[in-house]
Amino acid sequence: MAALDLSIDTASVSPVRKRRFGNLFLIAAAWIVIVFVAAALANILPLPEPDHMDIGGRRLPPTAAHLLGTDNLARDMLSRLIFGARASLIVGLLAPVIGLGIGGALGMLAGYFRGRLETLIVGSVDVLLAFPPLVLALAVVAYLGQSITNLTIVIGFLSIPAFTRVARAATLSLAQREFVTAARALGATHLRILVRELLPNVFLPLLAFFLLAVAVTIVVEGALSFLGLGVPPPTPSWGSMIGEGRESLEFTPWLAFIPAVTMFLTVLAFNIVGDTLRAITDPRQGAL
Amino acid sequence: MNAAPLLSIENVSVDLPTPRGNLRAVDGVDLVLAPGQTLGIVGESGCGKTMLSRAILQLLPKKANLTGRVMFDGRDMVTLPREALRKLRGPSLAVVFQDPMTSLNPVLTIGLQIGETLQEHLGMDGSSAAKRSVELLAAVGIPAPEQRLKQYPHQLSGGMRQRVAIAIALSCEPKLLIADEPTTALDVTVQAQILDLLAREQRSRHMAMILITHDLGVVAGRTDEVAVMYAGRVVERAPTSDLFKRMRMPYSEALLAAIPKIDAPPHSKLPAISGRPPDPTRPIPGCSFSPRCRYVKDRCKAEKPALTTPDSANHQYACWHPLSLRERMSA
């Protein structure tokens, strides 16, 4: 319902907003689209299998057959990069969705109902926040086993506190506004106030934060894979590719640099898009 | 006033715990309102007008403590279960708030905000709710109502938004409308239009209305009865014409005198009530207006006057030394 409201909202106000989107935003958005399309169409694209070893052709510089060369095990770099985008994007998008859903709901409940519920939620979130995230992720992945699902759940769980805080802060200020009292005076239930009155208002800052969280998550996934606790081999992932490239950094530095630059650009793009959206939602709230 | 009252407030007090101690926002107020009647509640900022209206609606802050009885349409609002109370708000009781900038949800369209109430309380379907919304917007004097349905609050002017807020409040034909300083946030030229609109709708729908304001001029032509509040108490209450003919409470007089006069010579000083209302967390023993009253006597500082009806049955006031006609002339 909120997504629907939001889409109507952006559609009708878009002429005003378009002006504020700079070229940088468009380039960033285009990069994200390219990465998405490549990852989605990885099976259809004319690429060698990411785990196919071209015997005799280890650490080849770029050639016509291998546009980005081959890695330590003679696997096609471009193919691995594109298939690796899948792992990064799946974890990078799904983990923050967990945080957005659970954290957003908890934050809104805390900010709206206040009292003991708020103390409980804020308290437990603080406990979670105080826990060293990488250690928790390592422990869980080591105990439950390496898989994309486990990785997503752990990182998603770790992103709950941030979303809770953003949602709570936004709800706190909005719940004081008169339109909430007005809704109560018209006999609205708590559920209706939360879903109909507050959610559309809280959603925009949460969405902007979501995009920033995607960027952070991609980095965290990369770090875990680099440490060998992320996506299990031979499935490629940007982090594990950097890790594998490290072995031959002095002879063939591009093996580590290519995935690193790709990750850098993708994270930067998500940050720019998220930042632009945040900048647009902020003054808009002030103006009303 | 003999008919069964729609609303009767009996000895209502509202206490708010604050870090500086207990704050008595409303102090033992009694009021009665018959169906179709209009009551004006007048007083300066912080005298408990809004808290009283919130007490009627049961929309007080969570920490607030309410004592007394609020009977609405034969039911005690204080003990009414939450669900029954919720069903009452909207169809029977509605409010127009002070600031139309904040009383509408900024991210929802006007049509959604009006239609929602209709669908929820009157069980209308989408298209008939939209049709009714257009009628309501037209009734409150909004031009091109069909187009407004798709607009957002920030696309309307303050006066328009207040009209929308009134349309929402009227949407379920409430029996009682509480207008809490409906014109304070608006342009002076729009104020009269909004007040006339409220008066017109109130008469045509035969609904009761409580008009809360700090401006005695606002209630003058538009209410049947006026209650003047000061420091959480009703200090004078009378039928409107009576009150303006024979004002007894020095505070009412001071409020009236504070209205700028159009025929006053230019650059003349605006008459103001000196001092401030007493700190509500530190009640004073005597009449709460005594520190600011120009007619104050020793007794005023020692004993709190009760709300009594010494001269006629429906003119109540709380004062030891009420103004007589002669004193008012010389004042």
Image (cartoon, helix red, strand yellow):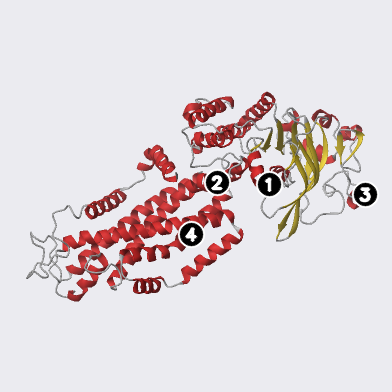
As drawn, is B11 to the left or to the right of A154? right
Can residue B289 be seen here? The reply is: yes
Q: Mark number for residue B81? A: 1
Callout 2 touching callout 3 (CB < 8 Å)? no
> Which image quarter is the N terminus of chain B in?
top right
Q: Is residue A261 left or right of residue B225?
A: left
Foreground: disc 2 or disc 3: 2
Q: Please, which chain is the residue tagged with disc 4 on?
A: A
**Image depth: mark 3 or mark 1 in front:** 1
Q: Which mark is residue A193?
A: 2
What's the distance in space between the residues labelled 3 and 1, CA to CA? 45 Å
Alpha-carbon span between mark 2 and mark 3: 52 Å
User: Is residue A114 shown above or below A182?
Assistant: below
In the picture of the structure, the residue carrying the numbered disc 3 is B299
- Tag 2: amino acid: Ile
Task: Check chain identity for marks 3 and 1: say if they share one.
Answer: yes
Is any atom of residue B264 visible in this view? no
